[in-house]
Image: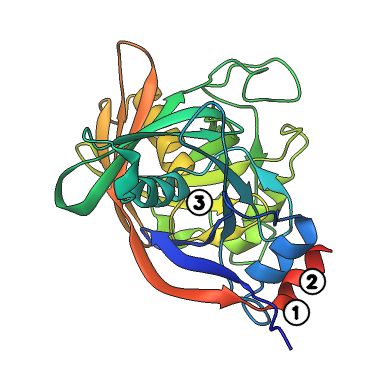
Amino acid sequence: MTKKMGQAFLKMHGAGNDFVVLDLRQVSLRVDANLARAIADRRTGVGCDQVISIEPSNRGDAFMRIHNPDGSEAQACGNATRCVASLLLAEHDTGKSTGQTVIETQAGLLPAQAIEDGWFQVDMGPAYLDWQDIPLSHEMDSLQLDLTLAPEAGSGAGPVLSDPCAVGMGNPHAVFFVDDLDTIDIPSVGPALENHALFPERANIGFVQVTGPDQLRLRVWERSAGLTLACGSGACAALVASHRRGKCGRRAELTVDGGRLIIEWRAEDGHVLMSGPVATAYRGELDVALLATAA
């Protein structure tokens, strides 16, 4: 009897933002919402913040498809882009001597390169600041949104949150500035902010504390994923928002729960560059029974 084969995967992370990465360039398997949910389940699947599929591309070296734990697709993920870039650059048959690769995503083409000490840098493209490009539900100044969330009395959810800055990074972000991140009960306030009527596509919600000159601490409630150890596009949005509000320069170090990232908002073209580490935790194989959920 011929044994049916499963699908190989890598468990990777960028600053603690963890992924199940599937190289599907040479196979017919495609991840749908059902399979993504099964893989991402931390009790009955592998468990991850996002499921990443590497697929063929006619525009870049590969297409990166991103599924959230609820099965929905995301347009961009900076930490996952670094992970995929590290895999593509490690392929000796690519003939790439420059240490650069281009990854196609729903947010566009993202150039990436290897830099020092095992870090990788991704050009995340331009930051979108116009309300319709983020998008917001109606016209307003993205520098300071008319949005306030007051925690319920006695809930212990922390201080009043108000006047965030909105940034589009291929996905929508709202960034709140707080005096002390540890006073914010993010799991309590995150869902209401993510699903606020101001965000027609929902939003990733960032909370930033300025800790020093060009030093920021960041935590992000990601839409469809919840509180994660790091959010690459969220870090990019946080840097852009912080610079726009006069809280840092165009380049800063961001400390996230899973490590640190360096973000730069380039003046000449408005592109945002994200630099950070990648790591592989282990390799495995998805069982055919799990793969059957995609049928």
Q: Amino acid at mark 3?
A: Val
- The dot on residue 292 is 2
Q: Is residue 274 left or right of residue 183?
A: left
Residue 241 placed where, x, y %?
43, 29
Among numbered discs 1 and 3, the one appearing first in the sequence? 3
Residue 181 placed where, x, y %?
42, 55
Image quarter of the N terminus: bottom right
Q: Which residue is most to the bottom?
A: 1
Q: CA distance from mark 1 to mark 3?
A: 34 Å
Q: Is residue 61 visible?
A: yes
Q: Which residue appears at 63% of the width and 19% of the height?
A: 133
Q: Amino acid at mark 2?
A: Ala
Q: Is residue 119 left or right of residue 136?
A: left
Q: CA distance from mark 2 to mark 1?
A: 5 Å
Instruction: Estimate how packed mark 2 is, as few (under 14), some (14 to 19) or many (20 or more) residues with alpha carbons within 10 Å.
Output: few
Residue 189 occupies quadrant = bottom right
Q: Nearer the viewer, residue 194 or 259?
A: 259
Say which of marks 3 and 2 sits in front.
Answer: 2
Q: Is residue 220 left or right of residue 154?
A: left
Residue identified by numbered label 1: 289
Q: Is residue 177 visible?
A: no
Q: Nearer the viewer, residue 104 or 7?
A: 7
Among numbered discs 3 and 2, the one appearing first in the sequence? 3
Residue identified by numbered label 3: 220
- Does residue 141 lie above or below 83 as drawn? above
Say which of marks 1 and 3 sits in front.
Answer: 1
Q: CA distance from mark 3 to mark 2?
A: 33 Å
Secondary structure of residue under mark 1: helix
